Image (tube, helix red, strand yellow):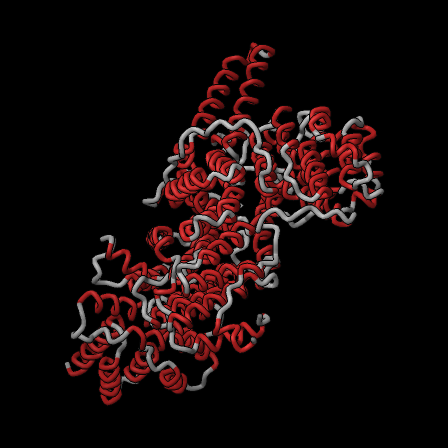
Amino acid sequence: MRGRAGLLDRLGELEGRDRTAQVRLALAEAEFRLAIDPATASGEAAERLRRSIAHDPFSAKARLHLGRVLHRDGRRWSALAAYREAHRLAPANPRVPLLAGLALLDLGKPEREIGAALLLALAAADPAAVTQAMADVGALLESRPDDHARPGKPKKRSTVPDGAPVAVWRGLLQDQLARKTPTASWVRSYLGAAPDAADDGKVAEVCTAAVLLLAAGMEPAEVRDAVPACVGRDDGHPAVRMLTAVLDLVKHEDTTFAAEAARLVGSRLVPVEVVCALQFTRSDPDRVDAITAVRHLDGYPAELREHACLRELRIAVLDAHARRAWSLDRFDEAAVLWRATVAIDPYRPVVAVNVALTATRTRSAGYAEAWEHAAELPYLHAAALAEPTHLVDDRVALHRALAEQALRRSGSLDLTGADIASWVADGDAVETWLSHWDLYYVNARLRFRSPAHLLGAASDADPDALTEARDILLRHLDGSIGTKDWAGASQFCEDARERVARAWRHAADGPGVDQHREAEQKAADALLDEAKRRVLTLHHLSIALRQGTSARHRRLLCSIARHEFLLPIGRLHARCVEQGALDGKVHLAEILDLATAQFAAGWDSTRPADPRDIRRMLADLEVVRAAAPGFAGIHVPYVRLLTWSDRAAEAYAAAVTALDLAGDPTDRTVDEDVLDRRSRVCDLLTVLVDDIARTDLDRELPGAHDALVVYRRAMTRHAISVVPVIAVANRLVGTGKAANIQRAEQLLSDRLGVARSERQRTWLRRELRRLRDLRSEGRR
Amino acid sequence: MFRIDIDTDSHYAVLGVPPDATPEQITRARDVRVHALRLRQRSEPVNRDELVELQKAVNAAGEALARPARRHEYDEANPHLKYFTVRTAAAPMFVTVADLLVVLREAIAGHLDESGVPLPLASDLERIDFTGDLTWNALLDEEEV
């Protein structure tokens, strides 16, 4: 048989061939062999097995192994679906129902009932019962996850059949222990029915099962009585010595337990994990208080306390007592106990959340820091594994929870003026909603397995649309997680970018290979609707905040613009039109663009006192410019901020660019609505251009020998502004000479023809009228 | 940072269980709480009315969460609860019997293996060698023969 490298070479070669039946079977087998190679990681193995199934849809073994790989990864429901298919294709293969039975035992109660029935049917070698139980598995899969139909009442089971295969026998123990502490009669029946492995194997199996029963809380006397006599005779057997040692250990009082346990572990008679399990049951909050439980743990020698399992035991004990303290409203005590676990493992996300919750309840000073840490850790873990989907559910839940709570502070989603005033006044609720919703959205996208849904592309997206969706998502990623200075955030972004790039490549292969698309369609639609509500809320907020004049209002408006333009505006526009929120005549992006221009129109000329505010706002608007390069209105606040940063030349250049983007406001060939928006944006931009020119003149004139030279220079430098033109005209008029007045009139007339806004034209016309009046008066 | 409302009156908070608690944990938490409240009603007659109300709330929470359909509905309407409730920080072996059995069996198997008495492999979940599942294929294997 070929090795991995040889198989990969052969696979590459076969993929280039015509897909005859023979080639497809060879491809299926090659993918299968690569998947079951022990060196293959589980994610890759699952992917290869799916490809193997795509090449050979009748391969029962590929489905069995797909189920096995998913099962080992803890994805038991997905595993069950694969087992069901494998069973349909190969109903006589006993490996399939066995694995299905074991998977069912790890699920809820109704699933466990079917799992146990399946194992018993296998133990009794009853094919009809196996078929029935597998049919129940099918019914169970059909009923997941939205309805809660469950199979009927469980069948009574009494004894364990003799001669059951080892896996079945072990599964039945797991089933019993998951239900309750087994009765003595069941334990006797169970241990007595131990499978006939080779002699050593049988003794080892029975002793192992007996230790498991003890660790799960079974009375030692009952276990001792139930162990078959054949085991007791072989006291030189390592398994018997282990069982005897454990039976002696459980007799010890709490005060001497640790010392004896340490001795047994040191003598290699008992594994440390068994000791930890037994110690944990003795540390239950119902049994001892936290201080006593910790004192018992301190009874272990220092070197043993450093063992990974003992460290986990200490965390488990502290956590159990912390949760009990929390449930009894003793929040300070809970906080102390959870903080004690941080000393053992500072990077546990659940502990970080629990600490943050106690900080919330106790209103501690470290509240904000605690939540920040709780948000940071899941990213750090995902970055450490280079897997952006690791803990993605936690991240989605956290950011969604924070965003929803922050939004609820607004009082109502209609966002009336009073609501907004109280929302803005409520600490940083608005900022929290702005940032955590984006974090939620990006994580929710990264969670999709369907490449198209991950990118946020429409079902009929062509390659250009896929690329656009990819770029929008990457910008959103950089604009949300990429701005955080959390540990691991930059590595996370890098891994996420790679995931997005992979999705884009897969999506470009066409919808045929997107097997998750349909299953995830509902969630994708829901997310798109949430994004639609987000953009509409942002827009309402932007309009309402225009009235405010504080530095915070200005900062918020720029931030809102950034959050609006990070969204997939094109898809949201289509969704709004589809659902009647927009009539479709005006594009959503144009509405947002004009709103951005208008919020800056209300800014007075006072620059913010804090230069950091200007930098922050400029940074927000840089993101907007990158996201919406073809839009003019967004430049209005941008140009204003540049002038406040004393970057007049850049401001002027940006305004000129924006005026070019805005288009000709006198072009009568376009729609009236478009013309109106264009005209309004051009008015706002030319106000800024004229302000820039005026400021320039104000600065240069005081020391100048010849004002006319300064004006003419300004006309060259600020060719779009009318301020220097009018100043020159006034200067000429001031000489009182008729020829100069005529020259001034000519100058203004020439300028009127190339003015860039209605506002400039109105101004120039007014000046011209004044000159004409002057000339008439002169004649008189 | 604005003050988060961690919904101290959510059904989960009333019962003191995490939002991913099993039905058994929910039932047990309800029973423990009701028992404790009954004892307090006897020992604190002054607070009886308040404790009776609390007991009603515990029963109502238990009723809502013990039924899967009602719980699903409640969870859908309150997604933030999944996060704003304390959760178990312990390793899985200290949380569920299934995980405990897996860890202990592996530990014991390793222990016995070191002693020269390996436990037999029981199912495909424990095996890593599946050579027997390979199928001879002319396009893959012929030139090697």
Where residue A772 appears, as percent x and y from the top left, is 18, 79
Side of A759 relative to A43 (left or right): left
Quarter of the image for residue A412 reads top left
Where residue A381 appears, as percent x and y from the top left, is 60, 55
Where residue A147 appears, as percent x and y from the top left, is 36, 38
Q: What residue lies at 71% left-to-right and 35% top-to-bottom? A: A211
Where residue A704 appears, as percent x and y from the top left, is 45, 83
Residue situated in front as seen by the camera: A553 or A105: A105
Residue situated in front as seen by the camera: A477 or A369: A477
Residue situated in front as seen by the camera: A21 or A217: A21
Which residue occupies the extreme bottom position in the image?
Answer: A739
User: Is residue A409 at all visible to an observer of this figure?
Assistant: no
Q: If the image is split into quadrants, where does the N terminus of chain A sit? A: bottom right
Decide: is B20 above or below A679: above
Residue situated in front as seen by the camera: B85 or B3: B85
Q: If the image is split into quadrants, where does the C terminus of chain A sit? A: bottom left
Q: What residue lies at 59% left-to-right and 71% top-to-bottom? A: A3
